[in-house]
Amino acid sequence: MGQMHDGLYMLQDTSLNQATTCLADFLSKQSFKSFSAACSSTLSSNLFSLWHSRLGHPSDVKVQSLSHVFPFLKNCCNKTCTVCPLAKQKRIPFPFNKNKCSHPFDLVHMDVWGLFSVLTSNGHKYFLTIVDDASRATWIFLLKAKSDVGPLIVSFYNMILTQFGTKIKAIRSDNALEFSIPDFYNSNGIIHQMSCVYTPQQNSVVERKHQHILATARALQIQSNVPLAF
């Protein structure tokens, strides 16, 4: 806290929570009831934006914590602030890619999830997810070690060739070493596309599939009260 000046606290190196608390304590001693009762919804929104700016652009929850002093702040929110995304956004948003391959197996997405916190009953620690870009058909393979990925890719390629009479043209994955089998790719004319480091958005198809798989499994587990061991 700082020094007292004209009944207001001068804030020095305090957190936003402390600033909000001090401001609320000061305002609670004032009489704003008649003023707040006369505020229209438009005025409330403008005042909400004003306090949002005065407090250094905090979240709506922080500003609404003053609602016991300023009732018009309770149900308002600031959706038009142009400063917040410029000041708080940590990276440029990735555009949503709606393009799909026109033919199955022109491009397949691959990724490994794990290590499991609890192993399966057969000792599997990971799973490999393969998603076809055109059809979004998905294959899941349980793994005991990441070293099993290379042989599985070769086996999957041969299965697609035999069952569907077509070849995989491109494989997209992250930079994990288990996907590095250049001799196999070169001998079969497969293009290996790798996402940039720390940029999972470039392999978003299989990343989203992972979220769906895990969410579904978690929901079924909670619903059926199955122990973690299973």
Image (spheres, rainbow, N blue to C red):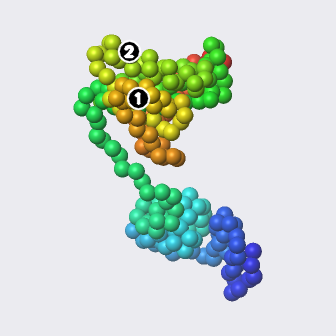
Residue under circle 1?
185
Q: Is residue 75 visible?
A: no
**Disc 1 crowd, CA 10 A, few/some/many (<14, 14-19, 20+):** some
Q: Quadrant of the N terminus?
A: bottom right
Q: Quadrant of the C terminus?
A: top right
Mark closest to the chain's N terminus, 1 or 2: 2
Q: Residue 94 vs residue 36: left or right?
A: left
Position of residue 209 relative to residue 227, above or below, is: below
Which of 82/132 is in front?
132
Position of residue 210 relative to residue 156, above or below, is: below
Q: Position of residue 73 (x, y in %)?
A: 52, 64
Q: Is residue 145 visible?
A: yes
| Badge nearest the viewer, 1 or 2 | 1
Q: Residue at x 28, y 16 (%)?
A: 165
Q: Position of residue 85 (x, y in %)?
A: 46, 62
- Residue 64, quarter of picture: bottom right
Residue under circle 2?
159
Q: Residue 183 vs residue 69: left or right?
A: left
Q: Secondary structure at mark 1?
A: helix
Q: Amino acid at mark 1?
A: Tyr
The answer for how far apart the CA atoms under marks 1 and 2 are is: 16 Å
Q: Amino acid at mark 2?
A: Met
Q: Secondary structure at mark 2?
A: helix
- Residue 101, quarter of picture: top left
Q: Residue 166 vs residue 73: left or right?
A: left
Q: Position of residue 10 (x, y in %)?
A: 69, 80
Which numbered disc covers residue 32?
none
Q: Position of residue 121 (x, y in %)?
A: 64, 14
